[in-house]
């Protein structure tokens, strides 16, 4: 697993991996409240099943609120055979604190 430590790193990930996925692993309610622009939603509880048929080399960046849950998910994805996994360590909470336009707020 590789770490994405700041907003520029996630933007670089998207630019370098146009086929890659950015995935919010939080609950449905949290996702609906607001999420990273363009992110898919696959909660921690279902992500392995949801991605079971995907190419195991597909670049995937995961995030949550603070980077803890997404680290667990990244480790689970690697254990399931995915080889190109990134964890956005600051989480959505950090993006919100920066008042980033990259966060889509639904409230």
Image (cartoon, rainbow, N blue to C red):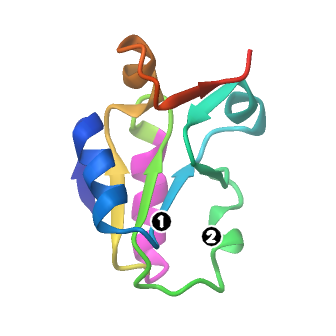
Q: Is residue 27 magenta?
A: no
Q: Which residue is mark 2?
A: 48
98 sits to left or right of 96: left
User: What residue is shown at x 35% (from left), y 68% (from top)?
Assistant: 17
23 sits to left or right of 56: right
In terms of secondary structure, what is the magenta stretch mainly?
helix
Give the image quarter of residue 104.
top right
Compared to residue 19, the image places residue 29 above or below, namely above
Compared to residue 19, the image places residue 25 above or below, namely above
Mark 2 vs 1, N-terminal side:
2
The residue nearer to you, when weighing 14 against 24, is 14
User: What residue is shown at x 68% (from left), y 35% (from top)?
Assistant: 31
Q: Which residue is mark 1?
A: 76
- x, y percent for residue 37: 55, 39
| Circle 1 SS class | helix
| Circle 2 SS class | helix
Give the image quarter of residue 75.
bottom left
The residue nearer to you, when weighing 54 against 69, is 54
User: What residue is shown at x 37% (from left), y 57% (from top)?
Assistant: 14
6 sits to left or right of 80: left
Given contact means CB atoms under 8 Å apart, are the residues at marks 2 and 1 in contact? yes
- x, y percent for residue 92: 46, 29
What stretch of residues is rendered in magenta? 69-81
- x, y percent for residue 15: 32, 59
Give the image quarter of residue 86.
bottom left
């Amino acid at each position: 697993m590789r770490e994405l430590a700041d907003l520029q790193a996630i933007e670089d990930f998207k630019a370098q991996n146009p086929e890659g996925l950015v995935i919010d692993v939080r609950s449905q309610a949290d996702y609906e409240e607001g999420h990273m622009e363009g992110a898919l939603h696959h909660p921690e509880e279902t992500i392995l099943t949801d991605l079971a048929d995907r190419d195991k080399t597909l670049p995937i960046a995961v995030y949550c609120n603070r980077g803890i849950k997404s680290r667990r998910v990244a480790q689970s994805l690697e254990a399931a055979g995915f080889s190109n996994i990134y964890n956005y360590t600051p989480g959505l909470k950090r993006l919100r604190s920066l008042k980033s336009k990259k966060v889509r707020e639904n409230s």
